[in-house]
Amino acid sequence: MASTRTKEASEPVLRAATVSANGAAPTAGGAPGEGLGLTREDLLRMYSLIAVTRAIDERMWILNRAGKVPFVISGQGHEGAQVGIAYALRQGYDWMVPYYRSVASVLTFGMTPREILLAQFARAVDPSSGGRQMPGHYGAAQHNILSTSSPVATQVLHAVGIAFAAKLRKTDQVTITYLGEGASNQGDFHEGLNFAGIHKLPVIVVVENNGYAISVPASLESAVEDIATRAAGYGMPGVIVDGADVLACYRAGKEAVERARRGDGPTLIEAKVTRMTAHSSDDQHTKYRTAQELEQEKARDPLPRFRQQLRDAGFLDDKEEARIASEAREIVEDATDWAESQPEPDPATATHHVYAPGTAGAGAPASEG
Ligand SMILES: Cc1ncc(C[n+]2csc(CCOP(=O)(O)OP(=O)(O)O)c2C)c(N)n1
């Protein structure tokens, strides 16, 4: 992780495909993305987003084990569903209310790898919270990405509220929020869905079902196997999608977005994903998952599956695959070095964004932080 870069150098970005055989036109003829309006360029961008997210995630674990960042909560196994679904929204116009595994979702919606690492290192210029929050609580006002909530499922209420505002203001903005299947047993989830169903709000609630709530298996979290079936109780469609199938996820996202924009109301999407890592860096999942189970779960990894799909379609060759891999490495090196080199928050600003300016304990005006 030795840096040869200066702080001023601009952040490397994901580039579009270098070869554009049919780059601008929607794919056709049995190709991946056929009928979905996705170009080869789109597909390679989606693949790059997944690859970069995975590389960031792996780096976060290394930084944690090296004692440089205090906590990691991982999205490995979730990235295909996140990129697939989020790709269907309008970045910078629609609203996203993420949860702690949402790195791929927020990157798809405009946050950058540097910003993810700033949150990990808790630096002063971290857009998520100015280094106040625990790592994993991403948010970016300029991208319409709300701050992540710590109490699970409360974000459903926030998303429903934003969707209600969009309806009252008569915009056609769509709000999307995410949670785990464990969190879908909280009252907030049910209250939020009920309200969204009654008022036909333009909101999409995505449950990323990875089979565990920390160490509790799904069979002990809920009496129903498919969380999506709960949608019927709130008068909205419940869609189950294979979270390792990026394009099936995109299709589910696209249909839900179109429905919401038309004014037809909310959708509950349940993406069946796998959690390839422990719940967090404070958990040891080998205490409750067998080696055999973990080995089997690798078959549900969206990254090699999407890669193979693109290779089979002739959209990805050795050269392009190597380019994307090297670009992902470069982006992660840059983000790590740059974020680590940024200053920590000034202790004098500790109460900024915590107390309202002018109230007891507020200290200096929040605008300085
Ligand atoms: C209201 C509340 N209760 C408990 C916790 C502690 N907690 C954090 S993550 C988590 C597990 C959530 O599981 P799930 O919703 O399935 O999501 P996953 O972590 O598997 O993605 C729990 C219990 C919390 N953050 N908030």
Image (cartoon, grey):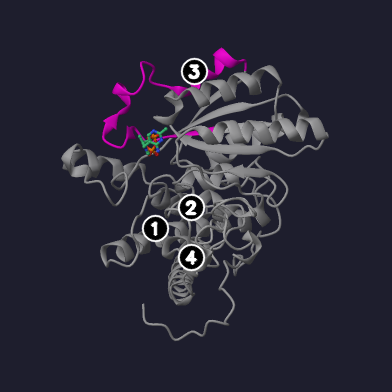
Q: Residue at the far top: name it.
A: 233
Dot placed on the residue nearer the N-terminal end, 1 or 4: 1
The residue tagged 1 is 57
Q: Amino acid at mark 4?
A: Leu
Q: Nearer the viewer, residue 67 or 272?
A: 67
* Whole-number angstrom distance, CA of label 4 to CA of label 2: 13 Å
Which part of the image, by quadrant, shows the C terminus? bottom right
The residue tagged 3 is 229
The residue tagged 2 is 103
Q: Which residues are magenta?
A: 206-235
Label 2 crowd (10 A; few <14 / some 14-19 / many >=20): many
* Whole-number angstrom distance, CA of label 1 to CA of label 4: 14 Å
Instruction: Where is residue 19? Give x, y as percent.
Output: 60, 68
Does residue 6 sit above or below 356 in this rendering? below
Label 1 crowd (10 A; few <14 / some 14-19 / many >=20): many
Q: Amino acid at mark 2?
A: Val
Q: Are marks 4 and 2 in contact (CB under 8 Å)?
A: no
Horizontal side, residue 229 vs residue 58: left or right: right
Mark 4 or 2, closer to the camera: 4
Mark 2 or 3, closer to the camera: 2
Q: Are marks 3 and 4 in contact (CB under 8 Å)?
A: no
Does residue 312 sit above or below 10 in this rendering? above
Quarter of the figure with residue 167: top right
Q: Residue at x 65, y 26 (%)?
A: 266
Instruction: Where is residue 53? Give x, y as percent.
Output: 46, 57
Asked which secondary structure carries label 3, the reply is helix
Q: Amino acid at mark 3?
A: Thr
